[in-house]
Amino acid sequence: MDRRSFTKGLAALPLMLGGSAGRSAQAQARWVPDKPIRIVVPFAAGGSTDVTARLVAGALAERLGQSVVVDNRAGAGGNIGAETVARAEPDGTTLLLATSSTNATNAALYRRLAFNPLRDFTPISQIAFVPNLLVVNPELPVNSIAELVAYAKAKPGQLNYGSGGAGSSLHLAAAVFAFRAGLSMVHVPYRGGAPVAADLVSGKLQLSFSPMVEVLQQVRAGKLRALGVTPLRRSALLPDVPAIGEVIPGYEVALWNGIMGPAGLPAPVVARLGSEIAAIVGSPDMRARLAEQGSDPVGSTPQDFAAFVAAEQPKWAELVRISGATVD
């Protein structure tokens, strides 16, 4: 080989290597799981978190060409399920349906957590904001928030409200309501939101602040009466039902959920899962299905979700403080 040919070959080498590196990076970005993916739901089956997880799991399985199963690990306000994921191998096959309880509120409610809500997880994509609905059993003689407040003040300690467990979003939404309105009510904890709705319909409970998806059908069927929603804005599904903040100034409880993995997830795994889940949430079909439940779809990037979660902890810590809610 002459000198000119040798020099030409050297000049072409970076281009060849660059092309190879580019193809390698592209292959890494298209990470494909080599075994089934498990989405851990930290609450009981049938609740709003479970419903959302199953919607995402079905769509994600189709896009990845790999089975995606939902694993309910209820208990301790979501901490049992969250710890399961925090301790899992960071290979992308064990994910958490994270909520404002597991990754924001519980840091303020529990003095001793077996995981760090920020450091022990990798945010992948926020799925939605989830409004809670203040509902009462129709036998309770109240038809508005003002009437409920007056009734509860006349019968202190006689109204029972259910929640998905001590420190859950249902618990905190009710505790903040009681604090803002100056009420004394009895908290009855369950292992998830679905059994709360069942006992509310049967009359074992008088009221709850349930995720809309868990009680909307019962409200439409007349089995429950809706009095208010917990975010600042009314829901398009129930436009005649006021935001609680319209009646009780300063009241707002905005719940959310999303997908996270253990800390240390490789960048290609985060990139693939993040793009797929954002695409799923952004699809017209999924947006419609989430909206039917009263949820406000998001579908954020991993970076935006991480920044959002970091900002949420102090907000929820303040809600815990003013509500006086305690767990241990």
Image (cartoon, rainbow, N blue to C red):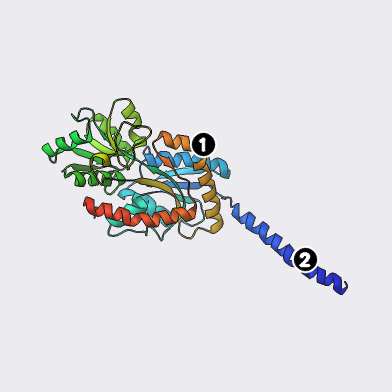
User: Which quadrant does the N terminus fall into?
Assistant: bottom right
The residue beneath circle 2 is 12
Residue type marked 1: Pro
Crowd tier of the residue under label 2, counting other residues whose Cα lies within 10 Å: few below 14, some 14–19, many 20 or above: few
Q: Residue at x 31, y 29 (%)?
A: 219
Q: Residue at x 25, y 47 (%)?
A: 250
Q: Position of residue 9 (x, y in %)?
A: 80, 68
Residue type marked 2: Ala
Q: CA distance from mark 2 to mark 1?
A: 47 Å
Q: In the orientation shown, which residue stands out farthest toward the right?
A: 2
Q: Secondary structure at mark 2?
A: helix
Side of 194 relative to 93 (left or right): left
Side of 277 relative to 203 (left or right): right
The residue beneath circle 1 is 284
Side of 120 relative to 147 (left or right): right
Quarter assignment of residue 182: top left
